[in-house]
Image (spheres, helix red, strand yellow):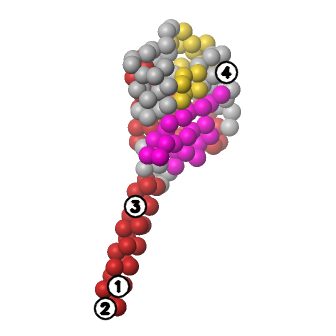
Amino acid sequence: MKVSKNIKNCLLFIAAFSAFQQASLAQCNPSDFSALKDLYASTNGNGWSNTASWALIKNNSICPVGADLGTLPGVTLNNKGRVSDLTLINKNLTGTLPTTLNGLAELEVLNLSRNSIGGNIPAAIGAISTLDTLELHRNNLTGSIPINGNNL
């Protein structure tokens, strides 16, 4: 009887550890990582204010195991570990917005105001169906705001 209790406790520990490990791994969604990496590259991430905190993106080509995108300044994750808010106000972003921003498929808030981003607003932003707040003022962007059935 004592042996079966030990086995039961061991199985409970394994199940709890496995659930914890899966939750940790979910904090670095590959699609979110790729979109953030593209944003970093296309907006001169090396010149951003507080760029050292973005070393996770700068120094890796894929999501490192156990990495947490929620530790990046300006990034908030939802309860599924996906980027839901990206707010980089007055961080010296220059260049253009990447067309891959729709990789942030659960993004609700995108605030890149008060930077020096130029070029057209990518149509891919309009493909993010969860996006309900888009703040791009005080940049050098051109073109219209793409709206494809989201809540903007």
**From mark 3 to mark 1, how far is it between C-alphas?**
21 Å
- Mark closer to the chain start, 2 or 3: 2
**From mark 4 to mark 2, how far is it between C-alphas?**
67 Å
**Circle 2 residues within 10 Å: few <14, some 14–19, many ≥20:** few
Where residue 56 is drawn, which disc sits there?
Answer: none
**Circle 1 residues within 10 Å: few <14, some 14–19, many ≥20:** few
Where residue 19 is drawn, which disc sits there?
Answer: 3
Q: Which residue is mark 2?
A: 1
Region rendered in magenta: 68-89
Q: Which residue is mark 1?
A: 5
**From mark 2 to mark 1, how far is it between C-alphas?**
6 Å
Residue type pointed to by label 2:
Met
- Mark closer to the chain start, 4 or 1: 1
**Which dot, 4 or 2, sits closer to the camera?**
2
- Assign a secondary structure to mark 4: loop
**Which dot, 4 or 3, sits closer to the camera?**
3
- Assign a secondary structure to mark 3: helix
